[in-house]
Amino acid sequence: MSGSKQIRRKPILLALLVGLCGNATLATLSVSQLAFTIFPIIALVLAAHMLYQEYLSVPMEGDTPLCTLLAFLIGVFGYSAFLRTQFPEMGTNYLSVMISLVLVIWLALKMGVAARPVAE
C-alpha cells in the first residue's frame, strides 16, 4: 500500500456492518422462517449513524469510497449466503457465495492485503 493511497479501516468495517444489518432487517421483516426481532433494526440504525458521523468528521480520500461500497456489498451477499445455508428451502447460495468471494478478493487487492508482486 503506497503512502498516497491511505485507506482507513473504520468506515470499511462500518459499511460491512451496515450491509449485514440491512440484509438481516429485510430478512427479519420478509422471511417467514425467521422469528421477528428488533436487534437487527437497532444495529442497523446505530451502524448507519456511526458511518454517517465518520463521513462528516473525516473526508474519504483515495479508494476509501470504493472499498466501503465493496464492504457493504460483501455484507449483503454474505448474510444472504449464510441465510440460504441455514434454510436450504429458500434456494441455493452458490451465486451469493461466488459474488462474495469475488468482492472479498477485489477488496483485498484494493487495500493491499493481497498485493501483487512488483517487478523491479
Image (cartoon, rainbow, N blue to C red):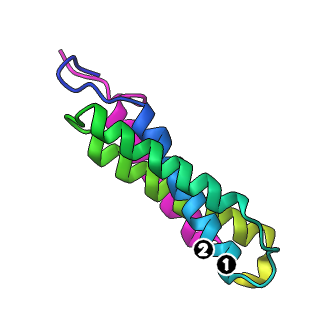
Residue 4's image quarter?
top left
Magenta highlight range = 93-120
Query: Image height check: is 20 above or below 57?
Result: below
- Residue 6's x, y, as percent? 27, 25
Majority SS type along the magenta span: helix
Residue in view at x 37 percent, y 46 percent: 52
Numbered mark located on residue 29 in the image: 1
**Residue 95 lies within the magenta run:** yes
Using a 10 Å C-alpha cutoff, classify the residue at mark 1 as few (fewer than 14 neighbours), some (14 to 19) or many (20 or more): some
Q: Circle 1 sits in a helix, a strand or a loop, which is it?
A: helix
The answer to whether residue 20 is seen in the rendering is yes
Residue 61's image quarter?
top left
In the image shown, does 109 or 66 lie closer to the viewer? 66
- Residue 50's x, y, as percent? 46, 42
Numbered mark located on residue 50 in the image: none
- Residue 12's x, y, as percent? 43, 40
Position of residue 108 in the picture relative to residue 37 (left or right): left
Residue in view at x 70 percent, y 73 percent: 28
In the image shown, does 77 or 94 lie closer to the viewer? 77
Residue 34's image quarter?
bottom right
- Residue 116's x, y, as percent? 32, 29
The residue singled out by tag 2 in the image is: 26
For badge 2, the amino acid type reads: Leu
